[in-house]
Amino acid sequence: MSVVRTEITTGRQHGAMEYSEPPCDLDEVRMYRLKCVREQLKKMDYAGALLFDQLNTRYATDATNMQVWCSHNDTRYVFVPAEGPVILWEYQSCKHLSEGLPTIDEVRPTKPFFYFATGPRYKEKASVWADEIADLVNQYGGGNKRLAVDRCSYTGLKELMQRGVEIFDGFELMELAREIKSDGEIALMRKAVEACELGVQSMREALRPGITENALWAKLHETNIAEGGEWIETRILSSGERTNPWFRECSLREIEAGDMVSFDTDLIGPYGYCADMSRSWICGDAKPTSEQSRLHAYAVEQIHHNTEILQPGASFREVSEKAWTIPDEFLANRYGSLIHGVGLCDEYPSIKHWPDFEQKGYDGTLHPGMVLCVESYIGSEGGKEGVKLEEQVLITETGNELLTSYSLDLA
């Protein structure tokens, strides 16, 4: 897959993707996602949602601007009423970035009150900000003052509550709204997976003794950006004895011949969709040792078994109970979740392993249109190496479909 550098004349594009060929009608996807948010608002009897989290604002409007920077500076936010206009507060001089988006009715200049922007005047600025938000709740809530907020400082929430606004958890609202993907969303996700697998292939071709973990990881970044992708959420790649236990980030360590190399992509690709897959390889021409082959065989068995049990109508509890039984030697190092949802990022649900279910798990039901990642980490407690595998799976009307296709082979 290559990004086409010809401007589209049909359908409205914007931002980083305005010179790419979309695999579906982007406006249909945008309106579907906004509809899902509004349906969930009505189910939960909220007047509206105030969204600061950049993935939630992306889902509701598809308006983007410096998403990573704005994730830790509360300067962009969106008000989505159950009924009424969607309003985006945008960073200075950036109104043009959302032109043509059918999801946005009005763009206003942002009124930040975080300390970096306002210094010791933050309380004064928060009061002005809260007046505006409370006025919108009163104007479009029809007497309902229940507002879902996903991310906001204590100062801002306190000011809103002093104005009679009732605050509820916006993350619950948005996770449930984002649960079921439309056909258009799946088409966009397939593009993200294509870009990711091209990046994985670039890594495979670059893997040779002497390359550093960082240099190998950079191949994935380079390909993702070249193919229209956006960023990578983590940097989880390790080699040799750094693969056990899991979750070490890549380093300047030089990879040696015969080392196990394991990684997790966590890649945000074209159109903002996540491609979350994991693979493990042997560096160089050396054949896997018997122990490396044994660990890998267990991981493949776990992935295959747990993918097969994903069927529409199955409960999270049922999936957890029927999941592959992890041998005792690997139990302590098991991955944190059995299976998790994925969309614009890792999303609801997070299905826990059976030994953890009563303490950490919760129930729910698999539905067609959900996309899930099946996880496996196999590494003995105190062992030298570990294998990480992960597949991305679409729940269909009749079963499931693998969205990731890159080989699981170790060699």
Image: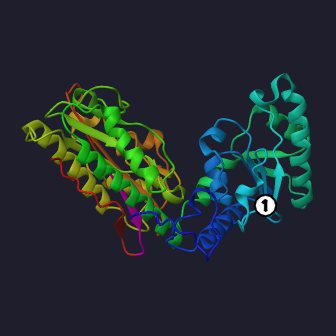
Question: Which residue is at the far top?
Answer: 120
Residue 214 forms part of the magenta stretch:
no
Tell me if 276 is positioned left or right of 181 in this view: left
Q: Is residue 194 above or below residue 245?
A: below
| Magenta span main SS | strand
Question: Which residue is at the far front?
Answer: 6
In front of the other: 349 or 189 = 189
Which quarter of the rendering shows the N terminus? bottom left
Disc 1 is placed on an element classified as loop
**What segment carries the magenta color?**
390-397
- Residue for badge 1: 86
Q: Is residue 265 visible?
A: no
Rate crowding at label 1 as few (under 14), some (14 to 19) or many (20 or more) other CA atoms within 10 Å.
many
Residue 392 forms part of the magenta stretch:
yes
Q: Quadrant of residue 208?
A: top left
Residue 222 placement (x, y as % from top left): 41, 46
How is the protein colored in the picture? rainbow
Q: Is residue 70 above or below residue 2?
A: above
Tell me which residue sits at (81%, 44%) in the image.
110
Under mark 1, the amino acid is: Val
- Count how many numbered circles sit on residues in the image: 1
Tell me which residue sits at (90%, 47%) in the image.
132
Tell me if 269 is positioned left or right of 213 in this view: right
Q: Is residue 377 visible?
A: yes
Residue 141 placement (x, y as % from top left): 87, 59
Residue 372 placement (x, y as % from top left): 42, 57
Tell me if 337 is positioned left or right of 169 in this view: left
Tell me which residue sits at (8%, 39%) in the image.
286
Q: Is residue 68 above or below residue 108?
A: above
Tell me if 89 is positioned left or right of 186 in this view: right
Residue 51 placement (x, y as % from top left): 71, 49
